[in-house]
Image (spheres, grey):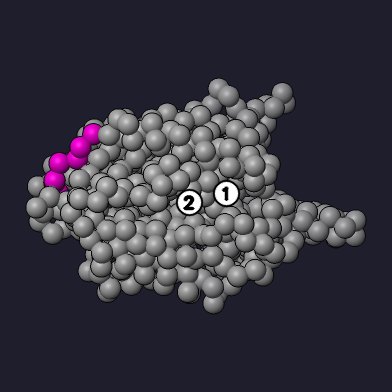
Amino acid sequence: MGWRVGFGESEITPPIGVWLTGFANRIKPCDDIHDPLLARAFVIENSQRERAAILALDLIALTEEQVLVLRKLVRDWTGIQPQNLLINCSHTHSAPAVGELAPSCMGIPDRNYLDVAIRKAATAVKLACDNMFGSKLFFGTAECQVGINRRQRNPDGRIVIGQNPEGVVDHQVSVLAANLDGNGLWFIAFSYACHPVVLGGDNYSVTADYVHFARQSVEDFFNGSAFTMFLQGCSGDINPKERGNFEIAQKLGRELALSVLQAMLKLEHIEDGPITGVISTLNLPLLPPPNQKQLREHQRQSREAAKVAKKEGHMSEAQWRVCEAEWASQILESMRNNSLPTSEKMNAQVLRIGNIAFANLASEVFAEIGINVKSHSPFAHTFALGYTNGCIGYLPTAKAYEEGGYEVEQAFKFYGRLMMHAPESEKIATDWLIRNLKKVANSR
């Protein structure tokens, strides 16, 4: 029999008036829709009737609660079990706030929108399952130069968000493609590692950023005979090489699309084989917080800075400073209540489809970690994905902790976390992925 595949889509575009997330300097809700946000599902079944679903969402991330709801809906509606369901977010910074993932300075979540969006996402999987066709499966790769390492070292030694041409970048574009028997229709899932932040915090239009233009360009090339989905790779320390406006987003999206098409010229056939998944919750140790004296001083300074910024009309800075004060307050309260956490949980997944594999973490994984996992995978073809089945914040390399910078020192606060997880988190996550890649490689 061979492979059977299905493709489903639901639109998850919010209404105007919903707050966007991804930047702490937005001071009002969205006021325009530039392009639709999509939930797209790719369901694959082998000759043994084993199924896997790949679900791609134009959201910055999902909360743990939303992941659990999605898993239950998909299981109830389709029978696909959580270990065989991969839920990846594109991580666009021009999508709605998603709930308890971040403090108020990162956007106010709209519960009604989110409830509908999650059900629509599950609907995409159901639609794909209801429209399965015989197909051939293929894998291909190409190189793309859209991303650049963003951990720039200043003359004073500090690491800031900028451009580091010498930094590690994963230039690989990976493509999983299905060609439907008898009608020439293509389903194309492509992965690349780069933050969708061409549009900055001054953008109030809903958009999937360069991702939208990449998908659109590939589909235009096939003249309506292709459906695409984008899977975000390990892009924690990777930004676009150019940023600014929609023209730049379109230019970079087309550049990525060209790489996808180049990969399509080098496709390798994937033989019918096992579909099997493994999921787990990893326990990551947390770093200790500052002492109470330092926290009180930080709280005081942040409150004063917020007042000054508000008085001077710098509302975005005032908003950020308030969040800093709130963070210090929450830590102090946890200290008083003896309730400071010592570890944090993170979802991890390995999914095998024939002779290809997906290694997935619920975090903003640094590019070097993704490259390392792929290089140690027993599979000839491996996708390394971040922002999958949730997102707890950044997963830097252990070396990055010595260097410092936003991803290590600040970003956890914008995820609503009290403390950053420790440097050994890289090894915990990497070891689990490699161990389970080997496990599923030895499965039937």
Name the residue: 19% across, 50% down. 181
Under circle 1, the secondary element is loop
Query: Observer-nearest residue: 378 or 90?
Result: 90
Query: Which residue is under mark 1?
Result: 209
Q: Relative to residue 280, is residue 69 depicted above or below? A: below
Name the residue: 27% across, 74% down. 76
Name the residue: 58% across, 42% down. 250
Q: Which of marks 2 and 1 is in front?
A: 1
Q: What x and y, as percent, mark residue 102?
A: 58, 61
Mark 1 neighbour density, 10 Å: few (under 14) some (14–19) many (20 or more) = many
Q: What x and y, as percent, mark residue 180?
A: 23, 50
Of mark 2 and mark 1, the one earlier in the sequence is 2
Q: What x and y, as percent, mark residue 150?
A: 59, 34
- The answer to whether any part of residue 186 appears in the image is yes
Residue 325: which quarter of the image?
bottom right
Query: Observer-nearest residue: 252 or 121?
Result: 252
Q: What residue type is labelled 2?
A: Ser
- The answer to whether any part of residue 414 appears in the image is no
User: Of the numbered discs in the image, which one, if any, rests on residue 90?
Assistant: 2
Residue 81 painted magenta: no
Over which residues does the magenta segment extend?
268-276
